[in-house]
Image (spheres, grey):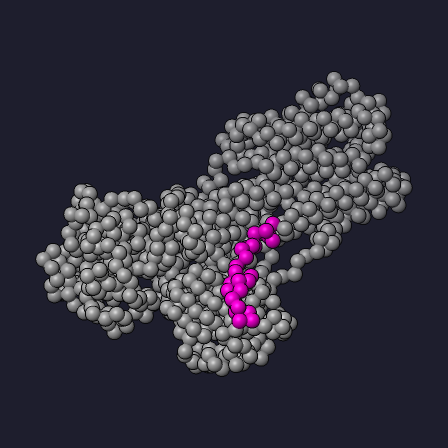
């Protein structure tokens, strides 16, 4: 895949004097080392290292400045609801009600402390998610080789590069030996890039074509080399992208907008209601000014859901913790809610939908015999079968033996016992428990087939001596290896793209021996190649040739003897089909954006259920579209293409970003996966950016809101389910608090209109809002889904937290609470105002506790989901009753809150009477379901 990312070039030229890079790719090796005043055989001295670090800075990527704990704490007081509470406290002190004032200030401080700890823990969680892997690199310092942390590398350092290592900084190559690097994370180039040292390039050469340079954040696939560091930290190409991400503005999250709207509404209601109460009490009831101030404070306090910000933070924290158990690590808490609104998932294929481990499943020899290979992944156990009969390699046809010989000895992959203390940075952790497989994934699969077959146990095919090797690259599309047998015979073993290997072949190995490769044979092979591609198999062509040379060049790889093809598959993860089925039931569209071939992508899409057999039959669009077709499409065609096609192949990061932006313009809320540096802008742009935890780069993880620790698509779907639960819990906890606020305010207003004294004081209302409701709300935050979260459409982007649909229910519950409270107040009023307030207080608290059971699910009966199925709500129920009794029975608290002593039997009757709220809620939901 050719790269379209080239944003680093301009700044590279403009800032050459600052960065020290000075277009090193345009100069020879002697010029570069002279420019940096370094001896390539000795490296820098310690003094030179210090000077270089002082001049060019440390080799660390730019990061956003951390928010100080003090700023986080101060931020908690900026909420508009908190401002109103400050006003209420001020009025209390003015009215000589110091106890009320201090209690209100205590509530404000409690809120701030809770909010601070939630946000501070979130900041710490973000830091812990960032990659903590300490990469090491070998450098020359003072004539000696030293292994140091990559962070300590400086401009001018001579670094030694070996297979499997990550490159610590941007560097100009001085020496190479079969060096190939994986630059897909930076440039989008899907194939390893062959590197050179002794070549000058033209100015303005694209980064992807600067073959004499290596880049920070990429890694070495093959070979070795030596290079001089020309840029570190923020001056590297990956560093520039990291800087641009910090400058990229992202819109305010959908949920923050919703909560801001709700907060403003509640604040407006609080102020408006307080003004009405003041006017009614002062002008209609003719209260004294001091007295009406107390009533106004109580009204203001009762209208504000003080605990809402803290409770929402707790809901997010619990949701994030649950998602972490599903391997989805949340970097931004609000992402938990946004997931519930996702309508489209843009996912990669390799490693996300598939297992990211290739294995050979089919063999087709030049003698036109086909074989099936058993075993999964890198398991070395498994039989080779022909027409359901196991093939013994000792008695196998010569064509099959030759194929097995080529795959076993024609690659650089290695199979080792894990007990061996041989280190290899490319260790494949998906192998069996006893072995490890190292090297290129395709070559590793071929090597496993050879080992599985037992070909190396045959004397005629015992291990030959390796003489020379031509690594694979995207230009020549083959690997060639020269080997020598014990009898002195030499052969070139070739593996590569079938069409390329066939192009280089003139003979074919059949059951009768070597014959000319005719057109009929080519057609048979091409047909099999196409059939396998349609089955999502990656096809590798195999050939060989006898030679007399000790070294080989590309020109020697011709007139080959065609031997056969093998079909490899990166199988879908077993749980992916169910996950995609869940998405479809949930109204979520899944789109595959991959760098793979269109046929392979389309085949995998069908296997996992993204598309089906009949899809696109009556459509003007194909089952899969390439990135070049997207880039060439006209505006109207592009929108139609994106609406109707679910598989996009040969994609580069810019095209991914284009599709994401178009979907957002069409009103979709998208989640997008990515792992490379060049995926970072698209991850940042997506409504929910999801980075791969295992194969993802640090820059991609920093740009994303969520990191998948297992790189598994199913984890995304599980996270979406949790996101829907989070939004449901946010809504239900908000409704729960709003019911209390509405009931409390109504008690005051109707109490005034009916001529009662103030039914509840400000501190009594604060206790109910913060303690009674707080305990129940935290318990409600732990509510899990009730089996239908993925059987409904995504939550609308514009769906408010408070909807008109719930208003009848809230009004009915509030009406019951108000009626029971005022009746209780009037019943005890003859025994004194404090006695009446005690009874009213207990009834308000208990009705709200029972209402918490109603709010567990707004549609289903609490008896259907299990009355006692949430242990935290059960515990909160008992705790609330105990605390209410404590505050009205303990003498000291009686004095603080203004309560009187009511008999325990009366409290028991009040608890039973308050349960009418639960039965009324059940009746309402039953009628609604009917």
Residue 582's quadrant in the figure?
top left
Q: Count the labels in the image.
A: 0
Residue 354 location (% of width, % of height): 38, 50
Please say if 274 is above or below 881: below
**Quarter of the view holding residue 480:** bottom left
Residue 711 shown left or right of residue 903 in the figure: left
Residue 383 image position (x, y, % from top left):
24, 44
Provide the residue span drawn in magenta.
Answer: 125-149
Q: Is residue 406 above or below residue 834?
A: below
Is 446 contained in the magenta span? no
Would residue 901 be visible to someone looking at this image?
yes
Q: Quadrant of the N terminus?
A: bottom left
Residue located 31% across and 66% down the image? 469
* 303 or 570, nearer to the observer: 570
Q: Residue at x 43, y 73 (%)?
A: 175
Which residue of the protein is positioned furthest toward the top in this rendering? 905
Relative depth, front residue between 451 and 500: 451
Q: Is residue 241 visible?
A: no
Does the magenta segment cover residue 132? yes
| Image: 361 above or below 526 | above
Seen as rendered, the residue at the extreme left is 512
Residue 854: image location, x then y, percent: 60, 31
Q: Residue 306, percent across and down?
A: 72, 43
Q: Nearer the viewer, residue 319 or 762?
A: 319
For the point 46% across and 55% down, which residue is it? 695
Q: Quadrant of residue 220?
A: bottom left
Q: Looking at the image, which residue is at 75% across and 48% down? A: 82
Viewed as shown, does residue 753 lie left or right of 524? right
The foreground one among 136 and 208 is 136
Give the side of residue 238 with respect to residue 518, left or right: right
In the image, taking residue 192 as reference, residue 66 lies left or right, namely right
């Amino acid at each position: 895949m050719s790269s379209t990312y080239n944003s680093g070039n301009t700044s590279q030229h403009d800032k050459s004097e600052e960065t020290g890079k000075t277009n090193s790719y345009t100069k020879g090796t002697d010029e570069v080392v002279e420019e940096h005043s370094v001896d390539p055989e000795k490296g820098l001295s310690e003094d030179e290292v210090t000077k270089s670090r002082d001049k060019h800075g440390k080799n660390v990527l730019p990061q956003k400045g951390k928010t100080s704990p003090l700023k986080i704490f101060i931020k908690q007081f900026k909420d508009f609801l908190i401002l109103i509470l400050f006003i209420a406290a001020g009025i209390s002190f003015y009215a000589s009600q110091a106890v009320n004032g201090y209690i209100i200030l205590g509530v404000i401080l409690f809120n701030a402390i809770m909010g601070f700890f939630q946000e501070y823990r979130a900041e710490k969680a973000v830091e812990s998610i960032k990659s903590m892997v300490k990469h090491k690199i070998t450098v020359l310092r003072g004539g000696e080789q030293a292994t140091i942390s990559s962070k300590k590398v400086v401009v001018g350092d001579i670094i030694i590069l070996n297979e499997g290592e990550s490159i610590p900084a941007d560097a100009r190559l001085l020496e190479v030996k079969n060096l190939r690097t994986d630059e897909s994370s930076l440039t989008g180039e899907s194939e390893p890039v062959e590197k050179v040292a002794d070549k000058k390039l033209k100015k303005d050469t694209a980064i992807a074509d600067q073959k004499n340079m290596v880049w920070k954040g990429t890694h070495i696939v093959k070979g070795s080399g030596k290079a001089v560091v020309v840029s570190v930290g923020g001056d590297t190409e990956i560093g520039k992208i990291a800087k641009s991400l910090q400058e990229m503005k992202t819109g305010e999250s959908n949920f923050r907008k919703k909560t801001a709207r709700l907060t403003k509404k509640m604040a407006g209601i609080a102020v408006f209601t307080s003004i009405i109460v003041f006017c009614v009490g002062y002008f209609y009831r003719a209260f004294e000014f001091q007295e009406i101030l107390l009533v106004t404070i109580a009204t203001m306090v009762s209208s504000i859901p003080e605990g809402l910000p803290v409770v929402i933070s707790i809901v997010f924290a619990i949701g994030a913790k649950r998602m972490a158990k599903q391997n989805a690590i949340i970097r931004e808490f609000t992402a938990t809610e946004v997931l519930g609104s996702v309508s489209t998932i843009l996912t990669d294929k390799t490693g996300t939908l598939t297992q990211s481990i290739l294995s050979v499943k089919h063999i087709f020899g030049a003698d036109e015999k086909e074989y099936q290979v058993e075993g999964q992944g890198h398991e070395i156990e498994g039989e080779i079968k022909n027409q359901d009969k196991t093939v013994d390699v000792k008695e196998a046809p010569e064509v099959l033996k030759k194929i097995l010989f080529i795959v076993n000895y024609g690659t650089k992959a290695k199979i080792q016992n894990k007990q061996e203390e041989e280190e290899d940075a490319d260790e494949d952790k998906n192998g069996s428990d006893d072995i490890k497989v190292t090297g290129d994934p395709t070559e590793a699969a071929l090597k496993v087939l050879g080992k599985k077959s037992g070909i190396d146990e045959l004397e005629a095919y015992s291990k030959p001596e390796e003489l020379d090797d031509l690594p694979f690259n995207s230009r020549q599309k083959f690997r060639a290896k020269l080997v020598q047998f014990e009898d002195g015979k030499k052969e070139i073993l070739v593996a590569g793209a079938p069409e390329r290997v066939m192009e280089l072949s003139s003979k074919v190995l059949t059951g009768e021996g070597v014959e000319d490769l005719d057109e009929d044979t080519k057609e048979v092979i091409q047909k099999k190649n196409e059939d396998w591609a349609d089955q999502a198999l990656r096809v590798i062509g195999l050939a060989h040739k006898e030679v007399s040379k000790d070294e080989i060049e590309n020109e020697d790889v011709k007139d080959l003897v065609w031997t056969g093809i093998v079909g490899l598959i990166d199988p879908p993860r077993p749980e992916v089909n169910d996950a995609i089925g869940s998405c479809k039931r949930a109204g979520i569209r899944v789109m595959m954006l991959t760098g793979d071939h269109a046929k392979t992508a389309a085949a995998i899409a069908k296997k996992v259920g993204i598309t089906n057999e009949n899809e696109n039959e009556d459509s003007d669009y194909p089952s899969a579209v390439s990135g070049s077709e997207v880039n060439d499409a006209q505006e109207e065609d592009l929108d139609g293409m994106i609406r109707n096609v679910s598989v996009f192949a040969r994609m580069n990061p810019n095209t991914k970003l284009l599709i994401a932006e178009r979907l957002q313009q069409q009103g979709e809320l998208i989640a997008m996966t990515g792992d490379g540096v060049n995926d970072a802008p698209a991850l940042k742009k997506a409504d929910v950016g999801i980075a791969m935890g295992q194969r993802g780069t640090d820059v991609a993880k920093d740009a994303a809101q969520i990191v998948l620790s297992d790189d598994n698509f199913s984890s995304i779907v599980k996270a979406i389910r949790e996101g829907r639960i989070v939004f449901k819990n946010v809504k239900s906890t908000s409704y729960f608090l709003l019911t209390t606020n509405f009931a409390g305010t109504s008690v005051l207003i109707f109490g005034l209109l009916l001529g009662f004294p103030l039914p509840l004081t400000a501190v009594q209302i604060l206790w109910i809002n913060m303690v009674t409701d707080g305990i129940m709300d935290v318990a409600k935050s732990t509510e899990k889904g009730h089996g239908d979260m993925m059987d409904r459409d995504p939550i609308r982007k514009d769906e408010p937290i408070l909807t008109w649909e719930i208003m009848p229910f809230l009004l009915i519950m509030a009406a019951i609470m108000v009626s029971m409270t005022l009746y209780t107040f009037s019943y005890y009023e003859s025994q004194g105002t404090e006695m009446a307030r005690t009874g009213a207080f207990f009834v308000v608290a208990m009705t709200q506790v029972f209402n918490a059971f109603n709010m567990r699910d707004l549609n289903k009966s609490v008896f259907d989901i299990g009355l006692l199925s949430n242990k935290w709500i059960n515990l909160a129920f008992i705790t609330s009753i105990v605390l209410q009794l404590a505050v009205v029975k303990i003498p000291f608290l009686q004095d603080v809150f203004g309560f009187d002593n009511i008999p325990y039997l009366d409290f028991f009757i009040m608890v039973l009477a308050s349960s009418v709220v639960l039965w009324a809620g059940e009746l309402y939901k039953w009628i609604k379901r009917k």
